[in-house]
Amino acid sequence: MAASKESLEALHTAIATKLTESIGQMDAGEKGLAAFLNVARQFVKDNGIEALPAPGSPTGNLAKSLASFPFDPTTH
């Protein structure tokens, strides 16, 4: 028996809500935070969510901070 569209939508909403709440309640460096962030990253990716790193936005700030780390794709 296949799950109904409504129950899958409810599950999707529950997962998004729980991930958001859990990450918001965890302190930086708290054990398990990296795992939650990885699950959230995959959830966002699986749902086709993309963001451009606009200056001043959280994504833009992340891109700016990552730019300070040298990265040579030919060595990795």
Image (cartoon, rainbow, N blue to C red):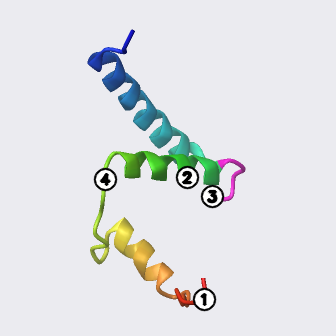
Q: CA distance from mark 2 to mark 3?
A: 14 Å
Identity, as a three-letter code, of the amino acid under mark 4: Ile
Residue 61 drawn in magenta: no
CB atoms of marks 1 and 4 within 8 Å:
no
Residue furthest right as drawn: 31
Q: Which residue is mark 3?
A: 28
Label 4, label 2: how many angstroms apart (C-alpha)? 15 Å
Is 18 above or below relative to 64? above
Identify the residue shown where x is 38% and y is 30%. Answer: 12
Instruction: Find out whether residue 30 is within the magenta segment.
Output: yes
Q: Which residue is mark 2?
A: 38
Name the residue at 40% across, 25% down.
11
Q: Secondary structure at mark 3?
A: loop
Q: Quadrant of the C terminus?
A: bottom right
x%, y% of residue 37?
Answer: 54, 52
Dot 2 alpha-carbon crowd within 10 angstroms: few under 14, some 14 to 19, many 20 or more: few
Main SS, magenta region, reads loop
Q: Camera-side residue: 29 or 32?
A: 32
Which tag, 1 or 4, sits closer to the chain's start?
Answer: 4
Secondary element at tag 1: loop
Q: Which residue is mark 1?
A: 75
Up-down relation of residue 57 to residue 48 (above or below)? below
Label 1 Cα crowd, 10 Å radius (few <14 / some 14-19 / many 20+): few
Q: CA distance from mark 1 to mark 4?
A: 29 Å
Q: Nearer the viewer, mark 4 or mark 3?
A: 4
